[in-house]
Image (cartoon, rainbow, N blue to C red):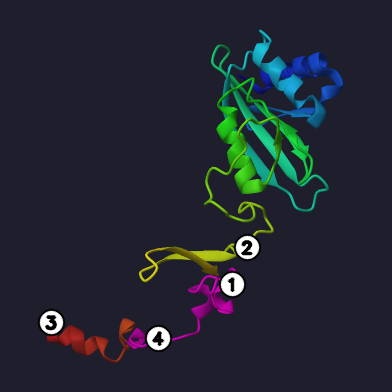
Amino acid sequence: MSDEALKELGDYIGNALGAAVVKTEVAHGELAVTLTRAALFKGIQFLRDDSTTHCEMLADIAGVDYPDRAERFEVVYNLLSVKHNHRIRVKVATDEDTPVASIVSLYPVAGWFEREAWDLYGIFFADNPDLRRILTDYGFEGHPLRKDFPLTGFVELRYDAEQRRVVYEPVKLTQDFRSFDFLSPWEGMTDVQLPGDEKAVIPLAVRPAIADKR
């Protein structure tokens, strides 16, 4: 669809849902609709059932973390209409404590997507019938895709031959491995001569002798 057609579709959705729509925008050839948290279920149900939108497929659910915002999380629903060949991206904002309505009753596949968002971001979905971790291990603490979660994690695991089982231990990386200056090692060695570098350049005085031997 052209950007103009997507804009018209966004205006249609905005008029139909009224105050439930925070804003609509077209970017990179796709329509994004931001809904209020309270109207999320109603809005996605409309996008599924309305003959003009007819988004019969939920492609996925993603989470985004903006730690500086009061409502740090953005939940993104990617909807697809096979009939009309268009995609609609739905966004809703929430925080660490406020649940988002589950849409499992609208799209059963949302159950796994919501579990993934809960596991990795800690976004809670109200009325999800099976909101358990899905990617991290049993007993895992924290949510690894939050921006304030350390890259190294809090624990590391290894197989203990004596105990014949996997054991968990606090991370033991030295502090050097936790510091990142974002400088390429090659950029930082421009004035350093490594052993063997002297062989890379043939002195000018030697070159004529090499040519005479040929």
Q: Quadrant of residue 214?
A: bottom left
- Residue plotted at (67% across, 23% down): 3
Label 4: state its secondary structure.
Answer: loop
Magenta range:
171-198
Under tag 3, what secondary structure? loop
Q: Upstream in the sequence, badge 2 or badge 4?
A: 2
The amino acid marked with disc number 1 is: Arg
As rendered, which of 107 and 160 lies closer to the eye?
A: 160
Task: Residue under label 4, please give it.
Answer: 194
Report the residue marked by disc 2: 150
- Label 2 sits on what residue type? Pro
Q: In this view, does 7 lie to the left or right of 214?
A: right
The residue positioned 69% from the left and 37% from the top of the image is 75
Name the front one of labels 3 and 4: 4
Residue bearing the label numbered 1: 178
Earlier in the chain: of badge 3 and badge 4, it is 4
- Using the image, tell me which numbered label, if any, was put on residue 58: none
Residue 186 located within the stretch drawn in magenta? yes
* Residue wearing tag 3: 214
Tell me the CA gap for discs 2 and 3: 62 Å
Q: Residues within 10 Å of mark 1 (few under 14, many from 20)?
A: few
150 up-or-down from 133: above or below:
below
Image position of 181 with respect to 82: above or below: below
Indicate the amino acid at tag 3. Answer: Arg
